Amino acid sequence: MGEIVNLRRIRKRQLGAEAEIKAAANRVAFGVSKSVRSKAQTERVLADRRLEAHRRPDPGDAE
């Protein structure tokens, strides 16, 4: 005789697994909080300014 299966539980388990897969994909795509994103952006801008400040003037510029 076969095992008795509750179809509702299996369905809920499948929906939960699908939701977890979607959540994992969203964590990868949107996983950084706003404060971390803004801090990283600020650091990138500062690094670009520092690099630009140390750049040699182009000999073609007549300023």
Image (cartoon, helix red, strand yellow):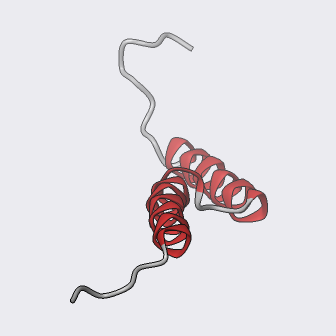
Tell which of 12 and 7 is nearer to you: 7
Residue 12: percent from left, percent from top: 55, 68
User: Hey, which quadrant is residue 35 in on the image?
Assistant: bottom right
Apparent side of residue 17 relative to residue 45 in the rendered image (left or right): left
Report how many numbered discs are placed on residues in the image.
Answer: 0
Q: Looking at the image, which residue is at 39% across and 24% down?
A: 58
Residue 56: percent from left, percent from top: 42, 38
Residue 22: percent from left, percent from top: 49, 55
Apparent side of residue 2 relative to residue 47 in the rendered image (left or right): left
Quadrant containing the C terminus is: top right
Quadrant containing the N terminus is: bottom left
Q: Looking at the image, which residue is at 44% across and 61% down?
A: 21
Q: Looking at the image, which residue is at 45% across and 65% down?
A: 14
Tell which of 13 and 42 is nearer to you: 13
Tell which of 32 and 14 is nearer to you: 14
Q: Is residue 31 above or below residue 48?
A: below
Residue 27: percent from left, percent from top: 54, 61
Q: Looking at the image, which residue is at 58% across and 61% down?
A: 31
Furthest residue in direction right, as rendered: 35
